[in-house]
Amino acid sequence: MASFSVSRLPVVNFSRENLKPGTSAWLSACSNIRQALEQYGCFVAEYDKVSLQLHNAVFSAAEELFDLPKEIKRKNTSEKPYFAYVGDQPFVPSLYEGLGIDYANTLEGTQSFTNLMWPQGNDKFCEPILSYSKLVSELEQIVKRMVFESYGVEKYYDSFNESSTYLLRLMKYRLPETNEPNLGCDVHTDKSFITILHQNEVNGLEIKTQDGDWIDFDPTPSSFIVMAGDALLAWSNGRIHSAVHRVVMNGKKPRYSVGLFTYNEGIINIPEELADDQHPLQFKPFDHFGLLRFFVTAEGSTAECTVKAYCGVLNVC
């Protein structure tokens, strides 16, 4: 049976001096991020651009959102799997409830969602959510650029970034009732390219190491979990590990979490520089939203490695 590890996730400090490309701090962070993603599939980013005031405003907005009647929340629909309202579905743990804001780093995307939930408008919700999404998408772009540079394929970064879109999911995990399982979110990997998770003070997120141990995470307002999804695993030709994680509710308060998920429109190609004699090509070019739709099929949901089943070349993952 898997046990808890006493180790902790790698931490990368994204203070302002670290954000200057070409500096020694930048190059060191590039190396640290690559090693963390290859070993753990994730790392903790210390990121001070999201102020404590904004952090508090976002989670206050999340609480207000989840207090809405379910018939209102169910208006959050999408033709993309997992982009819409999820709650009371038999295929997810009953403690979980979530809503999605597509194109969350744009005024149009955030305003559209706000007006759906509050037809009269709600600036107290829209403004902090938009500010937060813009700042965290900037963090995602820095991480992504560092990953591209660390593998020597930075020439592909600009065009790749231009096709990136952002889904912001607001998530609530209620407390389990007596004799109810405390699993808030089942064991899984994300289908995104990169996921950035942020949460209130309530613990619950657990990361599985490649050795089979579980690492928990003690959140702070300035700490973000940056996680590789299955699309990044494939893009890296299997070099990066897609983080296996779950949520277990052992606290005394509901857990609120905000996740920014990166998806790419069009076809994702595996850089030819990442395939060689030591690293044979493992994946074919693939459609990112096609991967997401494959995941909700019977074959995709039961596959040991979804992205390998979808676009794999070799029988390894």
Image (tube, rainbow, N blue to C red):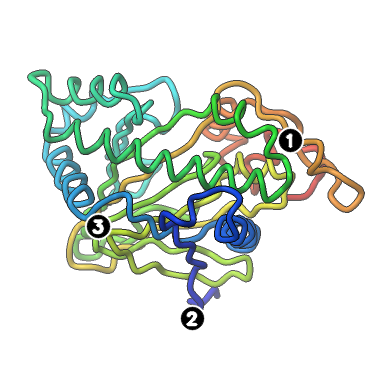
Where in the figure is residue 4, as x and y percent of width and height? 48, 76
Give the left or right position of residue 259, taking residue 123 as reference: right
| Badge 3 vs badge 1, beta-carbon distance below 8 Å | no
Task: Using the numbered discs, state the Cα–Cα distance from disc 2 to disc 1 in whole angstroms.
Answer: 35 Å
Give the left or right position of residue 47, taking residue 117 as reference: right
Residue 6 — which label?
2
Of labels 2 and 1, earlier in sequence is: 2
- Tell which of 11 and 251 is nearer to you: 11
- Tell which of 222 and 62 is nearer to you: 222
Residue with the mark numbered 1: 270
Q: Amino acid at mark 2?
A: Val
Q: Residue at x 69, y 38 (%)?
A: 309
Task: Using the numbered discs, state the Cα–Cα distance from disc 3 to disc 2 in whole angstroms.
Answer: 23 Å
Where in the figure is residue 66, as x and y percent of width and height? 17, 40
Residue with the mark numbered 3: 200
Total number of numbered discs in the rendering: 3
Q: Amino acid at mark 1?
A: Ile
Q: Amino acid at mark 3?
A: Asn
| Badge 3 vs badge 2, beta-carbon distance below 8 Å | no
Of labels 3 and 2, earlier in sequence is: 2
Q: Quadrant of the N terminus?
A: bottom right
Q: Nearer the viewer, mark 2 or mark 1?
A: 1
Where in the figure is residue 163, as x and y percent of width and height? 55, 24
Image: 249 above or below 156: below
Image: 174 above or below 260: below
Q: Secondary structure at mark 3?
A: loop
| Badge 2 vs badge 1, beta-carbon distance below 8 Å | no
The 10 Å Cα crowd at callout 1, few under 14, some 14 to 19, many 20 or more, is some
Of labels 3 and 1, earlier in sequence is: 3
Give the left or right position of residue 171, taking residue 285 as reference: left
Q: Secondary structure at mark 1?
A: loop
